[in-house]
Amino acid sequence: MRRFAADLHIHTALSACADDDMTPPMIVAAALEQGLDMIAICDHNSAGNAAAVQAAAGDALAVIAGMEITTMEEAHVLGLFPDAASAEAAGQEVRDTLPPVKDTAKMYGRQLVMDAEGGIRDIDGRMLFMSSGFALNEAVDLIRRNNGLAVASHVDRPSNSVISQLGFFPTDAPFDGIEISAVAMSGGREAEFESLGLPMIASSDSHFLSDVGLCRTIFVLNKATFDELAQALHSIGRRRIAGREGGALV
């Protein structure tokens, strides 16, 4: 067993609100420079670039294929999946609920589907930045049907969190964990959310290269894999969350 540093919420240029520099090779380089062992790619309502980042990383960095679903209530939910195929299957179901748009760049920004070298393969023509057709419980069920882990995104934020959108944290949604933001880490707010009784991670929610690894979760694992991560979230064996680091007012 050893300690692994993980940032489990990073966007690529497929998210319209992310910088165009968030390409697979540049994300991998930034993560390695920051001393990360594991990252998760979680674009808005899509897993279209996860496989490309995995290919760019090779054996140098563990990359979890994920997605950040925007529910009908406008709450954000992270889905972390065992492989890119599972993430893409869930992502296709989400994408099918989103309307097309002629030019996303005019409305919000480009949505770049990329290869492992950072080349542009396509521009996604769906409104990935909009609310999907999945209610909160349905989004969690979708993640679980595709063998994923469901984490409530940035629960401390005043918008787009489960708490901000519902006014409470639901006890009937089987989340595997909750996430707090860099701002909450800087403000020492971790204790506010411990009463939810769920494993707590801290992630950067990076949209820019300079934010990668801004805050992170330290896991004790045998190796940096999805299966080990899942066991750590549920404290199986000696696998566990050992702590959270970082934070800044961003």
Image: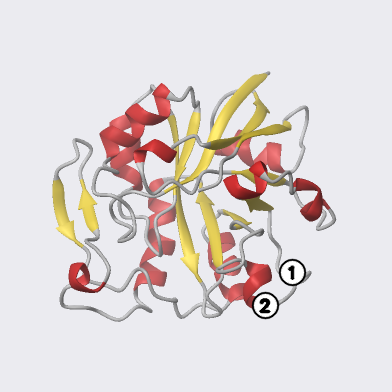
Amino acid on which disc 2 is placed = Leu
Residue drawn at the location 54% of the way across and 65% of the way down: 76
Q: Position of residue 94 (x, y in %)?
A: 41, 71
Q: How many marks?
A: 2
Q: CA distance from mark 2 to mark 1?
A: 7 Å
Decide: is 151 above or below 63: below
Residue drawn at the location 55% of the way across and 54% of the way down: 147
Residue drawn at the location 57% of the way across and 28% of the way down: 5
Left or right, 160 with respect to 61, comes to right
User: Which part of the image, by quadrant, shows the N terminus?
Assistant: top right
Element on which disc 1 rests: loop
Left or right, 63 with respect to 204, comes to left
Label 1 packing within 10 angstroms: few (<14), some (14-19), many (20+): some
Q: Position of residue 145 (x, y in %)?
A: 55, 63
Element on which disc 2 rests: helix
Q: Position of residue 166 (x, y in %)?
A: 67, 77
The quarter holding residue 186 reads: top right
**Frontmost residue, 78 versus 164:** 164
* Label placed on residue 169: 1
Label 2 packing within 10 angstroms: few (<14), some (14-19), many (20+): some
The quarter holding residue 151 reads: bottom right
Q: Are marks 2 and 1 in contact (CB under 8 Å)?
A: yes
**Frontmost residue, 69 versus 228:** 69
In the rendered image, which residue does mark 2 sit on?
166
Q: Residue furthest top?
A: 2
Decide: is 17 above or below 164: above
Amino acid on which disc 1 is placed = Phe
Q: Position of residue 23 (x, y in %)?
A: 26, 42
